[in-house]
Image (cartoon, helix red, strand yellow):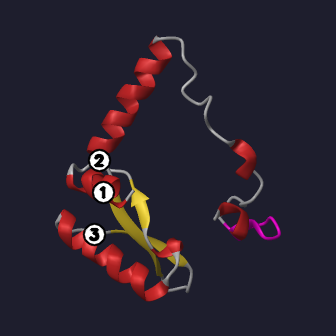
Amino acid sequence: MLGWIRASVEQDIMGLGSLEPGEDGRGRWSNWDGSAEERLERADARYRTTGTLWNVFATDTPRGMHLYSAERSRREAAGIDPDAHVDHSFEGIWDAEGNVIEPHGDEIVV
């Protein structure tokens, strides 16, 4: 899995980022800049320090979104439902602002 993440970041298919505290104390999204190696080292350092998955997120990139859109279009043109694999069981866990509303919802997501 780590090799796939490394290859995806190096090929600019996937970015890395995290939630950082904003002025109001709520998490604010931060997309990381720098070389693939610098971002991977940052992810490694954060994960080793905190031991939590919530501090490092995979993010989209223009190249990755182009590949995603092209594959989605290919499936639609072939008559394949591109969302058939999506698990919608997480609906109702968050409110409109992204707060967890389901009891133990944060545990369900993990």
Q: Position of residue 97 (x, y in %)?
A: 65, 64
Badge 2 amino acid? Ile
Q: Nearer the viewer, mark 1 or mark 2?
A: 1
Label of residue 3 in the image = 1
Q: Residue at x 41, y 59 (%)?
A: 58
Label of residue 75 in the image = none
Q: Position of residue 27 (x, y in %)?
A: 52, 77
Front-most of residues 42 and 99: 42
Mark 3 crowd level (few <14, some 14–19, many ≥20, 10 Å Cα): many
79 w.r.t. 11: above or below: above
First in residue order: circle 1 vs circle 3: 1
Distance from disc 1 to disc 3, alpha carbons, whole Å, reads 11 Å
User: For the C terminus, which image quadrant?
Assistant: bottom right
Q: Which residue is mark 3?
A: 40
Magenta range is 99-106
Whether the residues at callouts 1 and 2 have beta carbons within 8 Å, the answer is: no
57 w.r.t. 19: above or below: above
Q: Position of residue 92 (x, y in %)?
A: 78, 54
User: For the N terminus, which image quadrant?
Assistant: bottom left
Q: Residue at x 80, y 64 (%)?
A: 102
Q: Which residue is mark 2?
A: 13
Q: Secondary structure at mark 2?
A: loop
Q: Is residue 100 magenta?
A: yes
Q: Is residue 45 magenta?
A: no
Badge 3 amino acid? Leu
5 w.r.t. 49: above or below: above
Badge 1 amino acid? Gly
Q: Secondary structure at mark 1?
A: helix
Whether the residues at callouts 1 and 3 have beta carbons within 8 Å, the answer is: no
